Image (tube, rainbow, N blue to C red):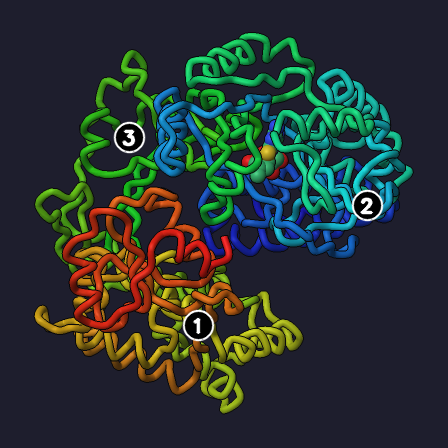
Amino acid sequence: MSAALKDVDKLTEAEAASELERLAKEIAKHDKAYYAKDAPTISDALYDELRQRNSDIEVRFPDLKRSDSPSDRVGAAPSEQFSEVQHAVPMLSLGNAFNDDDVADFVERIKRFLNLTETPKLTAEPKIDGLSANLRYEKGVLVTGATRGDGRAGENVTANLKTISDIPHTIEGAPDVLEVRGEVYMSHEDFAGLNKRQEEIGKPAYKNPRNAAAGSLRQIDPKVTAQRPLRFFAYAWGELSEPLSDTQWGAVQRLKELGFVINDDMALCDSVEALISHYRGLEAKRAQLGYDIDGVVYKVDRLDLQDRLGFVARAPRWAIAHKFPAEKATTVLRDIDIQVGRTGALTPVAKLEPVTVGGVVVSNATLHNEDEIARKDVRIGDTVVIQRAGDVIPQIVEVVKEKRPADSQPFVFPDTCPICDSHAVREPGEAVKRCTGGLICNAQIVERLKHFVARKTFDIEGMGEKQIAAFFHEGAVRSPADIFTLKARNEAGELTPPIAEREGWGPTSARNLFAAIDERRSMPLARFINAMGIRHVGEETARLLATSYGSWEAFRAAAEAAGDPESPEREALLSIDGLGETVVRSIAEFFAESHNAEALDALLKEVMPQDAEQASSDSPVAGKTVVFTGALERFTRDEAKAKAQSLGAKVAGSVSGKTDYLVAGPGAGSKLKKATELGVTTLTEDEWLQLIGG
Ligand code: IVH
């Protein structure tokens, strides 16, 4: 390492940040040379030194750890190396259950949704800790193999998947189109062998079998993958030209008959107790299985019931992953930071001596709120037990009191905002303290701006949390509209130095940033509403509002009028199924605030919200407002609502002039009367089913 480099101990925060940036780039460059081109340009010792320096800086400045930190990456090939494959049927994720009660709740929800009195049969099988893949066979021939990616599109790794001996290249007697899904994984034994070989040839070891499987599957050269001992369990399917079976169990058996390896530890259960007992059995033999599993997946067996249950967001209602308990570790609490959120909430964050938990280095943990700190009596300097379950933020479980330093003091939660010094107050019944600084609190403004450019809102490439915070602190971006005038102001010489001449920027990245900003001058209504950062209005509510009002003008007019408690607009908002008093009040308050109105007006000069697309515009009920009432007999209310919404209809809780259909079951009362008075079309359950073709 060059002698000019400063000791890590002596780096200032700013120096550390720029060092980490430089190291991330440099290590990525060497990784590419090493893994992708198999042509390293520096010695291994020098390479190790770079990594060591990077991790030393991260240990000293855990907050500065980058999202692209080399510490989180072990030799995976860059993804632009593979072409993209659109999945014909999205590859979903699973909801989680962490204890027996969660499992009972899951089964109850299913029964309620389907209005069943008996527990339907469910399968229970190990949740393999690998990475999922989709294998597409056409007329019995494997044509594409892809990783899950973001669920909609993955990477084309066909050649690599073909090197796995568990994966047949051709199959007989299969449907013309057959997509088989399952998990690519590596056994413990093979993992140990691979790491031994890696060591012998001076290459870095993989952290765990899952990383090894992922790194091996994503090799540029299939010959390298071929030398990696990967395996594949089939457990699901995507597009099919004809069904495999009418049950989950049957379909998986059929996959076995077609030549796939299925997991032997799959059971068919008919009660919550049976599910839990299979789970306990697997937990007990987990260490002897020879490969990593991180829980047990339960799936409703009958495929027609799976169909009726459908999906919420990106996970099926008919399946859940019952996770094994979180991994724990002990470390020292160095400090408690108070972070200020977008709505002023003060959140305590534990700053920990970095420690590895389940293969991941943890240096921050959540402490939730003031009461939580008091309840656990967590003090700075304490030795604490932390746990990490799945991808959730690590938590502090308990304090090891015996190791408490003699001079420790109870933590005093501040009464003022650490950023703007305004009073922090706790509303009665609330667990969080909030900064009252609102519009003058820089922390809140920055958090709102971060939310505005986040992935689920404006998603501006090149304008992440770090960049927007920097633009804010120099005064270049104070409100969302400023983002869109950045280019003009930059060209007019109002920003010094010009963006292209700044550290971390160049002419190309500046040009790309402006292009990315311009691409966002038109924005789907739901994202636009979500981006505004109204308290209690997140992604889901924003989507509901967008599909209910269709256009920005209609939504804004309603939201502004809703300030009047007697207004029909307020009633209409409340009648949207899924919106309650709290949300509606929060929307009205947001629009009543003149500063918000001004910021919006400025933004609307730059950005055009697009009218909302209906979820399914070719269905006969798309865009229609439906109310269900009475004792429904053909389906449960939840099921009816989910189905209607999936067809693009809006489901309202009460009848108004805007109602298109009232679907009335036996015993319908006041709503039916009101609908008749208003001349709303009333349907029986059968008529409704006929209308939607179901
Ligand atoms: S079923 C619609 N079964 O878990 C449900 N997933 O959290 C599709 N996984 O991405 C998944 N073992 O990588 C299913 N026996 C199993 C599984 C399994 C592991 C993984 C899979 C998926 C993730 C979902």
Image height check: is 76 above or below 292? below
How dense is the environment of label 1, judged by Cα within 10 Å: few (below 14), some, or many (20 and up)? many
Image height check: is 245 above or below 404? below
Location of mark 3 (residue): 380
**Real-space Cα distance between discs 1 and 3?**
50 Å
Q: Which circle's residue, 3 or 2, is located before the other in the chain? A: 2
**Real-space Cα distance between discs 1 and 2?**
37 Å
Q: Given the image, on which type of amino acid does mark 2 rest?
A: Asp
> In this orientation, which residue lies closer to the viewer: 645 or 687?
687
Ligand 1 occupies quarter: top right
Label 2 element class: loop
> In this orientation, which residue lies closer to the viewer: 631 or 338?
631
Q: Given the image, on which type of amino acid does mark 3 rest?
A: Ile
Image height check: is 372 above or below 448? above
Q: Nearer the viewer, mark 3 or mark 2?
A: 2
Question: Residue 225's spot in the image, x, y percent?
Answer: 84, 36
How dense is the environment of label 3, judged by Cα within 10 Å: few (below 14), some, or many (20 and up)? some
Q: Nearer the viewer, mark 1 or mark 3?
A: 1
* Residue at 48% from the left image edge and 45% from the top image edge: 311
Location of mark 2 (residue): 176
Q: Nearer the viewer, mark 1 or mark 2?
A: 2
Q: Which circle's residue, 1 or 3, is located before the other in the chain? A: 3
Q: Given the image, on which type of amino acid does mark 1 rest?
A: Ala
Report the side of 279 relative to 192 (left or right). left
**Real-space Cα distance between discs 3 and 2?**
63 Å
Report the side of 131 relative to 590 (left or right). right
Residues marked 1 and 2 touching at CB (< 8 Å): no
* Residue farthest along the bottom direction in this orientation: 492
Which mark, residue 612?
1
Total label count?
3
